[in-house]
Amino acid sequence: MDHYLDLKLLPDPEFPPTQLMSALLNKLHRALHDVRRNNIGISFPDTRHSIRHLGSHLRLHGSHEALDQLLAINWLTGMRDHVHIGQPCPVPAHVQHRHVCRVQVDSNPERLRRRLIKRHGLSEDEARRRLPDTAAKRCDLPFAVMRSHTSQQVFHLFIRHGPLLEQPQAGTFNAYGLSSSATVPWF
């Protein structure tokens, strides 16, 4: 994690920043999956937790080589008019670090009821009694709207920025650029 690359959304009268950030993250996910990279992390320097917004600034973290390889595959096709792409730069000295990870929330009672029926052989009425609509959990974390490439299901990718740490922690990143074990530089 000695380099970073900033991607900043440009203002667009037709698309809100939340929609553009979701599109950008979907493209990044496909690219990270295709190049099979587990050493590129992401962060959102201007995330606004109070309004559940990831902001308009995506920062990629990794080695200079990893970031160059990602840029070389031209994964930003269709987004170039909406994004200002920086150059890989060295991480500043004396920065703090933090985990940026996915938080999964079971917030859809209908889906949970179908799962109960399938796994436990319950009737629909019994499943509804066990899991009423009021059982839905609410998550106040910022999120992006993603589409699964395998099932084509749309889901919310909730993202948590962990507490600031003085020392980096090693680990790998998933195909979203997120990790519960590895940290990214925070500046």
Image (spheres, rainbow, N blue to C red):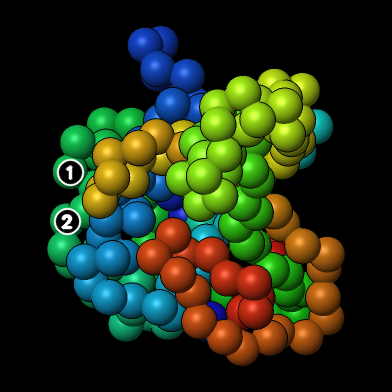
For residue 85, side relative to residue 157 (left or right): left
Seen from the viewer's position, the closer of residues 175 and 20 is 175
For residue 97, side relative to residue 14 (left or right): right
Crowd around label 2: few <14 · some 14–19 · many ≥20 (10 Å): few
Residue type marked 1: Thr
Furthest residue to the top? 13
Picture disc at residue 111: none
Total marks shown come to 2
For residue 164, side relative to residue 25 (left or right): right
C-alpha separation, residue under disc 2 versus residue under disc 1: 6 Å
Residue type marked 2: Asn
Check disc 2 and report its element: helix, strand or loop: loop
Q: Is residue 54 above or below residue 35?
A: above
Seen from the viewer's position, the closer of residues 87 and 186 is 186
Q: Is residue 24 visible?
A: no
Q: Position of residue 128 (x, y in %)?
A: 65, 26
Residue under label 1: 77
Residue under label 2: 74
